[in-house]
Image (tube, grey):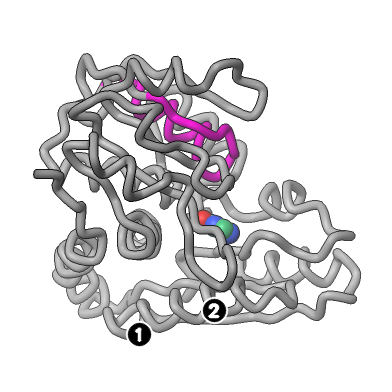
Amino acid sequence: MTEVIDGNAVAEDVRESLRGAIETLTDAGHQPGLATVLMSEDRASATYVSMKQRDCEELGIQSFHVEVDVDAPANELYDTVSDLNANDEVDGILVQHPVADHVDYEEVVRRIDPGKDVDGFHPENVGRLVRGDPRFRPCTPHGVQKLLEHTGVETEGADAVVVGRSNIVGTPLANLLARKADDGNATVTLCHSRTEDLAAKTKQADIVVAAAGVPELVDGSMLSEGVTVVDVGYNRVDGEAVGDVEYESAKEVASAITPVPGGVGPMTRAMLLYNTVKAASQRSG
Ligand code: GUN
């Protein structure tokens, strides 16, 4: 039987595990705080941000939200980030990607205090991760690792194929899975849009993580019996949520698979809370 990995349940475990630390910090006079910043008219982005705020409220994390007009000059977003950097009540800063077209997101990220960079996107934090000493693991890759751990999937010695090389998911995840650590030590192949014969790569994998942003790119014919499949994709096709994996055919061959929705998505949100509490602990310590 194929195990359908329940991301909602694992995310709930993560949230519960944070309650004690949040209480301790709050009692000591430092309630953890997360600031979200939105500079976009994208409805989905607005929904994601409001879900993150709701998550905070439920756990007793203070939440701050700033909306910057999409037509405002880049400086207005930079100033917002500077203000949040200077605000002692704010432990974590998340600028929702994408921002307005005329603003360079990388420049925005560079301006975030690395100690408050709960996305783990700042070059200093990316460098630390690659050097084997992560301060904040980016939320989606960390969530994928937690799902694998919870499912009892051994990464050490496993052949892991990551499909997609984004800065947000594929590249940091490939680094995390390859590094010397209990939840690493995998042999990692990082595939992307220029990979020739993707199926030949995925066929030899024990673990396949699909994070390319292409609906149903990976199907059962490209997988081997017993593989673990993690689907990071979230695409809207004819009004329906579809992953980067063709679920029905992949489920036929996989020993474990994440659904869309209800797989990786809830974990990304949970690990953001984890990073916020970590930031608060580090800043109060
Ligand atoms: N947009 C899509 N995913 C993410 C994420 O993990 N962090 C931020 N800041 N924006 C995103």
Secondary element at image label 1: helix
Q: With respect to residue 203, does 212 lie above or below?
A: below
In the shown orientation, is residue 73 left or right of residue 283? right
Whether residue 201 is visible to the viewer of this picture, yes or no, is yes
Percent position of residue 272, x then y: 40, 61
**Label 2 – label 1 distance at C-alpha:** 15 Å
Q: Nearer the viewer, mark 2 or mark 1?
A: 2
| Residue bearing the label numbered 2 | 47
Circle number at residue 57? 1
Residue at the image point whose x is 35% and y is 35% from the top = 220
In the shown orientation, is residue 172 left or right of residue 21? right
Depth order, front residue of 82/222: 222
**Location of the C terminus (image quadrant):** bottom left
Percent position of residue 69, x then y: 81, 80
Amino acid under disc 1: Glu
Percent position of residue 49, x then y: 53, 75
**Location of the N terminus (image quadrant):** top left
Q: Are marks 2 and 1 in contact (CB under 8 Å)?
A: no
Instruction: Examine the image and state in which quarter residue 224 appears.
Output: top left
The magenta stretch is 161-180
Whether 257 is among the magenta residues is no
Whether residue 281 is visible to the viewer of this picture, yes or no, is no
Amino acid under disc 2: Thr
Few, some or many residues within 10 Å of mark 2 (<14, 14–19, 20+): few
In the shown orientation, is residue 11 left or right of residue 17? right
Q: Is mark 2 within 8 Å of ligand 1?
A: no
